[in-house]
Amino acid sequence: MRHVKWIFVVLLISSLTSFVVKDKPTGGLNVGEIPPSFKIESTLSKQSLSLKDLKGKYVLLSFWASYDAQSRLLNTMLSNAIKSTDAPNVKMVSVSFDEFKSVFQETIRKDQIVDPLCFVETRGEKSNLFKKYNLNRGFSNYLLDENGIIIAKNISAAELSSYLN
């Protein structure tokens, strides 16, 4: 009986420590920080974009990949949330880390993401952009204010809509 009590105590302590570990930051950038700038070229419209070009506007950076169902779904929902509001001062920059342009193009066609600020980083997880944003712990999204400061991280479409309204 005494061993059963100790086993219960050990299980209780281990469950509490795993609960505390889950509350730690997920990595990447945090609210209040200025994200690293980058320049990327669109495979769709052959235009290039620098994050600095969007100063003065709210910017939603969405990092995703077609092979990651959760990030893909969230990217689509965020894109639809921005389309549903008529906020001209908000731009979404959608960056996929698919290694094949054909997969990327088919995914955005199926997901109906037609914004010209949709990019693919074909070096995938080996790209400098992936490393700069520390995405090795999972894909993220960031909402930047007009000064380029992160005001929200990993927001849902409903949260984004509340920011925009």
Image (spheres, rainbow, N blue to C red):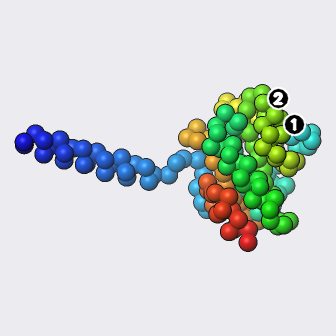
- Judged from this view, the residue extending furthest toward the front is 110
Q: Left or right of 2: which side holds 7? A: right
Q: Quadrant of the C terminus?
A: bottom right
Q: Please name the residue that numbered disc 2 is placed on.
A: 102
| Residue sitting at x 78%, y 30% | 103
Other-residue count near label 1 (Cα within 10 Å), few / some / many at <14 / 14–19 / ≥20: some
**Residue shown at the point (60%, 51%) measured from the top left:** 29
Residue 109 vertical position relative to residue 144 in the rendered view, above or below: above
Decide if residue 138 is on the left or right side of residue 12: right
Q: Which residue does the numbered mark 1 point to in the structure image?
A: 43
Q: Give the vertical position of 126 relative to 8 (above or below).
A: above
Amino acid type of the residue that numbered disc 2 sits on in the rendered structure: Ser
Label 1: element kind: loop
Give percent across and percent down for residue 74: 67, 49
* Numbered tag placed on residue 114 in the rendering: none
- Distance between the Cα atoms at labels 1 and 2? 10 Å
Does residue 36 show up?
A: no
Q: Amino acid at mark 1?
A: Thr
In the rendering, at what x and y percent does residue 30 appear? 58, 55
